[in-house]
Structures are given as C-alpha cells and as structure tokens.
Image (cartoon, rainbow, N blue to C red):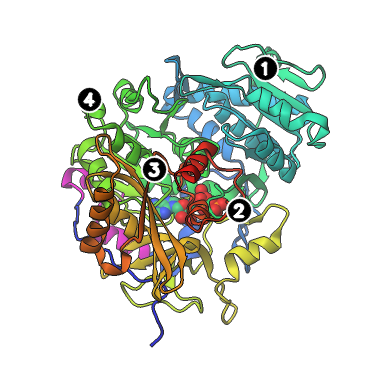
Amino acid sequence: MSQPTIESILQENRLFHPASNFSQQANIKSLEEYQRIYDEAKADPQAFWAKLAQTELDWFHEWDTVLDWQPPFAKWFVGGKINISYNCLDRHLTTWRKNKAALIWEGEPGDSRTLTYAQLHREVCQFANVLKQLGAKKGDRIGIYMPMIPEAAIAMLACARIGAPHSVVFGGFSAEALRDRLNDAEAKLVITADGGWRKDAIVPLKEQVDKALADNAVPSITDVLVVKRTGQKTQMEPGRDHWWHDLQKGVSADCPAEPMDSEDMLFVLYTSGSTGKPKGVVHTTGGYNLYSHITTKWIFDLQDTDVYWCTADVGWITGHSYIVYGPLSNGATTVMYEGAPRGSNPGCFWDVIEKYGVTIFYTAPTAIRAFVKMGEHHPNKRNLSSLRLLGTVGEPINPEAWMWYHKIIGGERCPIVDTWWQTETGGIMITPLPGAIPTKPGSATLPFPGIIADIVDLEGNSVPQNEGGYLAVRHPWPGMMRTVYGDPDRFRRTYWEHIPPKDGKYTYFAGDGARKDEDGYFWVMGRVDDVLNVSGHRLGTMEVESALVSHPAVAEAAVVGKPDELKGEEVVAFVTLEGTYQASEELSKELKKHVVSEIGAIARPGEIRFTDALPKTRSGKIMRRLLRNLAAGQEVSGDTSTLEDRSVLDKLREGA
Ligand code: ATP
Ligand code: MG
C-alpha cells in the first residue's frame, strides 16, 4: 500500500443545520434540492450552464457553442455578445431597481455616499466617455490603483463598458509592485487618487504612481487620471496627469455598452503571492459574468431587501467578484468601506453593520482572528441583529475562530458560508449553500453545482474517503481563468501538468491539500507547498494550527517544517497570544502538550516561537514560506513584494 498523500489528524464533529425559517425563504431550500441541481449539472454541465446563461444574463447576441475545450484552454459561450457593465447597470434601469441603492459607501473619516442604480449608471457612462476621449479603446489595458472609494467601482465598470480590460492593483502595494504589474499588463492609462484613508493616515497613492512611472519606467502609459479624495497637495505632470472631476465635467452620460465577444478579456489580476511570484490571471467576459452572478445569488442567498457587505479590497479577486460584479449583476445593494479596524476605532466594522443594517457580511479568517484578539466587547456593544448570513474566504478557518464568528457575530442564528476559491477560479467553488447545506466548523462543505471537484493523488486517481490529497477540478467551468497573461506556458505548467492528463482528460490542480469526509465534505488542509514532512508523515498546516488556536491563550498560529536529521522535519510553531497572556517557557510546554492531546504526538511542535505578528500578504494570508526560511536559520528568499509589513520579519529575526 502506498502512503497517503497527506495525512489527516484533526477530528471535528460539530454540525449546524440551517434554521428552518432561513431555509424556507432561501433561493436553494434543502439538501435534496442542492443534490438535485448538483446531479443535473454533473450529468450535463454544458446544458446546465447554458440554461443559466439564458435565464440570468442579458446577451446582445446568443452564443453558438457553449464550450470549446482545447485543454487546457477553454472558451465559453463562443460567438455570444455581452457586456458585463450592461448586466450590472442598464438592465436594472427598466425595473423598479432603477432607484434602489446600488452602492453604499462609507469613508474612513465618516463621510459617506449612496449611489442608486440610475446614478451609478450615469457616472459610469460619463467616465467611460472620459476614457474614450483620452484615446482608450477596446482591448487597451487600464491600470486601477485606488483606495476603496466609489470611483474604484465606477472605473472598473467604465473599463468594462468600453471593452478595455482593467488591471486593478491593490492600493497598499509599493511603487515597485505597481510598476511591475503595469509593465506586465502593458497598461495604457492609470486611474488613481491623490490618496486614500487607511488606519487614520493618508496613503499617498498618486505619489506612488509618480515613483512607479519615473524615468519612463512604464513606457506604455500615456495618461494618469486622479480622483481628488484626501485633498492633500499633489504634483500633476502637465500633459500626462488629469483630475477626474475636471474631465468628467460636462461630459455626456450617453455611452452605450460595447458588445463584447464572450471571450474578450475582461481583466487581468495578479494573485496574492503567498507561494511565489504573483501570476497575471486572465478572466474573460461572458463566463465570468455568469459565474460571479450565479455564485453570488445562491451562496449569499441574495434577496431584494438585503444589504450586502464584503469587506475585501477591490484590489483582490474577492472585491472584483463579490463587491462589484456579482452583487451588481444581481441588482443588489453592495456596501463598500474605505477603512480598516484600527486603534482609534477597533469596532468600526460593527458600526458600519449597525448604521446600514447590513444583512450579509463576508470577511476573511485573518480579520476574524484579529477580532478575537481585540475582544468581544467591541461587537457586543453594537446592535448586530440585522445580520442573517455570514461568510469567510481567503484561508482555512480554524474551527475555534468559526465558533467565535458563529456565536459573537452571528448570534448563533446566522449560517456561515466558508467559501473556498482562488483568483484563478473567478468565483467560489466549494461552499455551503446557506439554506441547504448543514455546516461543520472548518469545512467549506460541498462543491457548487457544475463544479466537479475531487481529491486526487499525483496520478490523478481519487483518494479514499478521509485521506488527504490534492484538491482538483475535473471539468472546466465558466469562471475559470483562461491563461496567465502573456505566458500560456506558465498557465499549463502551474495548473494542468502536476496531474498528468490521462486519455485526453485534464485535471485542474489547485495547489491546496484537502480531504473529503464521510459526508463528502471538503476540508482544506493547507497549501501543498506548505505541507510538513515529519518522520515520513505528511501533514497539512491547517490541522496543527487549529489545534494550537483551540488553546485559550493562542490567537493565531502558523506552523512550518524545519529540517531535522532524524525526523526529516520538525514542526516549528509561530504563535501570537490573546490579550492577557504572556509568553513563557511554561506556556510553550503547555502548548506542545495541548497539540499532543488534541491531535497526537506526531504533530508535537519541537519549538514554539512567540511573536507579536505573523508575516502576511497584503490580502491577509500567512506567508509560511518566509517562516520556513526563518525556522531553518536561512535568509528569506523568493518574492516578498506582496508582504504586508517588513518589520514583522525583522522582529522575528531578532527574536530568533
Ligand atoms: P499565490 O497563488 O500567488 O501564492 P494566493 O494563492 O494566496 O497567492 P489567492 O488566489 O488570493 O492567491 O488565494 C487563493 C488561495 O487562498 C487558495 O488556493 C487557498 O489556499 C486559500 N483559500 C481561499 N479561500 C479558502 C477557504 N475558504 N478555505 C481554505 N483555503 C482558502
Ligand atoms: Mg494561489
């Protein structure tokens, strides 16, 4: 018998059924209904997607071919003509939604703005005309480097309207990171702001753009558009730089949406860089529109009375699919918040929920763990009774963090959708449908209808139940990435060759380890690159970390392997503590014991390192590869451009 690919040692048996009043009103109402839809989609994926494309979206011209699959290159709805900005805006204007709030925005200093569908449409059309006046046309790539203000969404929708693919670069990135991405995408324009508010300080975005473009470092750029947000003094280069409000003044609001080929590029977006150099992920129009639309509708169970808030930044795929395109395509009210929890206002998220009566709240495990650390008195002081559904995305959520979210934020009444997906997948792939699928803390549960997900070994064979393996997808889906921008070979190598194609059948390799339990539920165990190898046992990081987090002293934990002559690797755990706890030799011993009693001696950390913070990507994901270097006493290597805070590494080094 060959060894399992990744071993699973965590036991989690809690099960939560959706409340019957939630299920009754839900879009998908029962496990049986989910199963029926899932089976139907599995039996004939093309028919399933085609039917949804017909009923859920507006097309200028219908497609001839649902799927053209020349592995690993897929084309969906070939021959179809569509525009996502039309689907997000124009089609709502002929309904009662015309005067419904499309976007509710709250700035960090407390200013706010609400745009109805009619108003948002008007601004998008005007700005699309501005772009045209600057010479932007179908196919030109446009960089967007903005704070979380309505103009970020307006810019994206305006690009989509004229068929110019956008490339949003997270506003927290450095000038160098911006320059590399603009160059990789060969952008013609950049849209930015003088600054944005983050944690009570101004992020000088325009200054970063100037640095990125200095010495003609991005030769493709002809113009820079600048939104006045913070009003601080800003250098404007004559001829190149323009104020948004100057150009927008008096411009016609008549700008019909460009009929795009279904397969025309909608955007290129770079991955978070948790495992290495970020990849320029290409998404196209029709398939992405359908996938972001239908996943939003079913997973967040959108109803017309909902106030939906996703706390991601538009610089990440979550912001693309679940702040802008998915909610607006559904005619929902989407909340956008500029700031972040900060010393002066640790409870700002709860204020936003109370102020707008948010009903659906979607955030990341990293944020939840930070809330746990800050203490439950912050949410407890606010009225969160409007909430009816919660979601998480970005990393595996430790069961104890899930329980806290369930109790303290959800008041034990809100289902939690733990959504597994990637920049590459375009939308959520594995997730509960909240009215239908009972949840287990730490499991993303079941695949979305039409997604043929599996756990496989490196030959592509399904592994037995409860055995760890590689998370894989067997059939193309409309929201899948089409290629790595400018590098189809990297696309093939990274996603389609780890599992060798068999009989012409290709399997998508996600790069995450996972297992499926006796109910078919998926448990993501961590990234394949981060798997530990202890005395011949391959362990995912998630389970050991969750065991640590289940100790009351631990707020957050990251485990890595350190080379060891006897065991191959020894487990080293980096741990941050909750409020009142102090690092000590005793606590270290206690935590080691705790891991042994929770999941067994095999996972016992050889070393516990206490720290104030863990190195994370700007999207809040733990970067274990950097910790692995530190644990082994090596210099940190590889791409660190997406690291959030360099000083975290320096401190860890000093502490070593
Ligand atoms: P890079 O690919 O550049 O290393 P990245 O993988 O962090 O960066 P993203 O596309 O932002 O870039 O993140 C996708 C990854 O996030 C998934 O592959 C998975 O590891 C993790 N992830 C996202 N959601 C979940 C979830 N609900 N449960 C477990 N893991 C998740
Ligand atoms: Mg990835």
- For the residues labelled 4 and 1, the Cα–Cα distance comes to 40 Å
Residue 509 lies, in percent from the top left, at 52, 66
Query: In what element is the residue under mark 4?
Result: loop
Front residue (pair 527, 292): 527
Q: Quarter of the image containing the N terminus?
A: bottom left
- Is the Cβ of the residue at disc 2 closer than 8 Å to that at disc 4? no
The crowding category of the residue bearing disc 1, from other C-alpha atoms within 10 Å (few below 14, some 14 to 19, many at least 20), is: some
- Give the label, 2 or 4, closer to the camera: 2
Query: In what element is the residue under mark 3?
Result: loop
- Give the label, 2 or 1, closer to the camera: 2
The answer to which image quadrant residue 243 occupies is top right
Tell me which amino acid carries mark 3. Thr
- For the residues labelled 2 and 4, the Cα–Cα distance comes to 46 Å
Residue indicated by mark 3: 611
- What number is the disc on residue 383? 4
- Residue 12 in magenta? no
The crowding category of the residue bearing disc 3, from other C-alpha atoms within 10 Å (few below 14, some 14 to 19, many at least 20), is: some
Front residue (pair 147, 357): 147
- What number is the disc on residue 248? 1
- What number is the disc on residue 637? 2
- For the residues labelled 1 and 3, the Cα–Cα distance comes to 49 Å
Q: What are the residue bounds of the magenta stretch?
A: 18-39
Q: Is residue 570 placed above or below 259 in the rendered structure?
A: below
